[in-house]
Amino acid sequence: MFADVQTQTLNENLLGIPVEIRVNPQSFLWDYGDGASRVTYDPGEPMPDSWQGETVVKTDQETPTSHVYTETGRFPVSLTTTFVGEYRVGGGPWIVIPGSVDVQASPGEADIWRVAARNVSGSCRNTVDWGCNGPVTLEPGDTPPKIFADQYDADGNWLGD
């Protein structure tokens, strides 16, 4: 998870004098939806697809804003960014504006699944054997993780191999 946030600057003329106001993101309150929350001073960033020529396994990398869920399910994720302001007049020094403003980001959702895999030799002979019982059955309202979405139709039915 990461916040897509930047310093905001407003330039205006007040009585013919240039006035600049800027607000800087100072801290980030992450609520991961499972009872855990954390304050960071780093907004995080998207993970790269590769690093030093190696493919990045994005599901197994800790970041300043990541979180480990211990249960599967859908969790409402929220982010509150605290901004602090400052201003300057006529190109002079920046002056801190007392106080801060908390801004709530658009809500998100973490859809947490658990994946288990084992190596098997040969074809499945019995559908009750581990690894031979086909795909996950989706309950009404469930959607597969994005990485498996192309394997299900719009009604949640598995399309097969």
Image: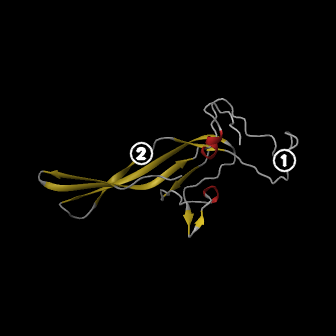
Task: Check the image and name the residue furthest to the bottom.
Answer: 52
What SS does tag 2 mark? Answer: strand
Is 56 displayed left or right of 123 in the figure? left
On the question of residue 34 being in view, the answer is: no
Q: Position of residue 62 (x, y in %)?
A: 60, 60
Question: What residue lies at 74% left-to-right and 40% top-to-bottom?
Answer: 135
| Circle 2 or circle 1, nearest the eye | 1
Q: Which mark is residue 123?
A: 1
Image quadrant holding the C terminus, namely top right
Q: Amino acid at mark 1?
A: Ser
Nearer-the-camera pick, 59 or 132? 132
x, y percent for residue 142: 64, 34
Q: Which residue is mark 2?
A: 103
Label 2 is placed on what type of residue? Val
Return the residue nearer the eye: 86 or 151: 151
Q: Is residue 88 above or below residue 29?
A: below
* Disc on the earlier residue, 2 or 1: 2
